[in-house]
């Protein structure tokens, strides 16, 4: 089992798509290991997106991600990092394939609804940045052998 970090970004919360997105992740067979609704401060946002700090869109991205509450979580499952990234689709909603979350709900490069860690190393860094160990719940869903067996 692998863990990955998800962020349902402010556009997702404001557009009332939280239930839709969590529903897709659950239906796929991923398990929720942590979830919290928070207003992100600029310091945390800048740490999360540190790899983009020299990009021209960085300031706008920090404004966006701190512009309203986000639902941040951890999901686990087989190959969870790759599975979630495939479910998200390409970064730019205009280019993302129909059937993916961004392809179905986003028409924007920035406002693309959901973040997913891009590698196991990123997932480990991001999980530690957003959650304390005590906020992460380790459990097995009843009947999971029918889903991930
Ligand atoms: P990813 O979320 O698909 O991994 P990244 O390239 O890591 O995409 O970019 C992080 C986030 O920054 C994107 O999800 C999107 O919200 C935003 N972003 C990326 N490229 C642009 C851009 O060219 N203009 C505005 N925002 C961008
Ligand atoms: Mg990225």
Image: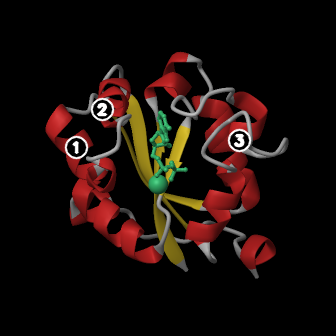
Residue 66, image quadrant: top left
Q: Is residue 51 above or below residue 60?
A: below
Quadrant location, the N terminus = bottom right
> Looking at the picture, how far across and down is residue 59, in whole percent?
28, 30
Residue at (38, 25) in percent of width and height: 64
Q: Is residue 105 left or right of residue 84?
A: right
Tell me if residue 131 can be seen: no
**Element type where label 3 sits in the image:** helix
In the picture of the structure, the residue carrying the numbered disc 1 is 46
Residue at (60, 45) in percent of width and height: 91
Q: Is residue 56 left or right of residue 100?
A: left
> Looking at the picture, how far across and down is residue 82, in whole percent?
62, 69
Q: Are marks 2 and 1 in contact (CB under 8 Å)?
A: yes
Which disc is residue 62 wearing? Answer: 2
> Looking at the picture, how far across and down is residue 42, in whole percent?
19, 33
Q: Earlier in the sequence, mark 2 or mark 3?
A: 2
Identify which residue, 140 or 104, lies in the foreground: 104
Q: Are marks 3 and 1 in contact (CB under 8 Å)?
A: no
Residue at (26, 52) in percent of width and height: 50
In the picture of the structure, the residue carrying the numbered disc 3 is 101
Q: Report how far apart the C-alphas of labels 3 and 1 lie in the structure.
A: 25 Å
Q: Is residue 22 above or below residue 34?
A: above
Q: Is residue 117 left or right of residue 112?
A: left
Tell me if residue 61 can be seen: yes
Q: Nearer the viewer, mark 2 or mark 3?
A: 2
Q: Earlier in the sequence, mark 2 or mark 1?
A: 1
């Amino acid at each position: 089992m692998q863990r990955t970090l998800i962020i349902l970004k402010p556009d997702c919360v404001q557009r009332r798509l939280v239930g839709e997105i969590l529903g897709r992740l659950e239906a796929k067979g991923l398990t929720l290991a942590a979830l919290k609704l928070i207003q992100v401060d600029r310091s945390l946002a800048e740490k999360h997106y540190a790899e983009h700090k020299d990009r021209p869109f960085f300031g706008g991205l920090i404004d966006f991600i701190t512009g309203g509450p986000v639902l941040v979580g951890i999901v686990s499952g087989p190959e969870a990092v790759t599975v979630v990234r495939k479910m998200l689709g390409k970064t730019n909603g205009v280019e993302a394939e129909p059937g993916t979350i961004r392809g179905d709900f986003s028409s924007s490069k920035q406002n693309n609804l959901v973040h997913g860690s891009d590698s196991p190393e990123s997932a480990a860094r991001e999980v530690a940045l957003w959650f304390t160990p005590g906020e992460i719940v380790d459990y097995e869903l009843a009947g999971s052998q029918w889903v991930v067996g």
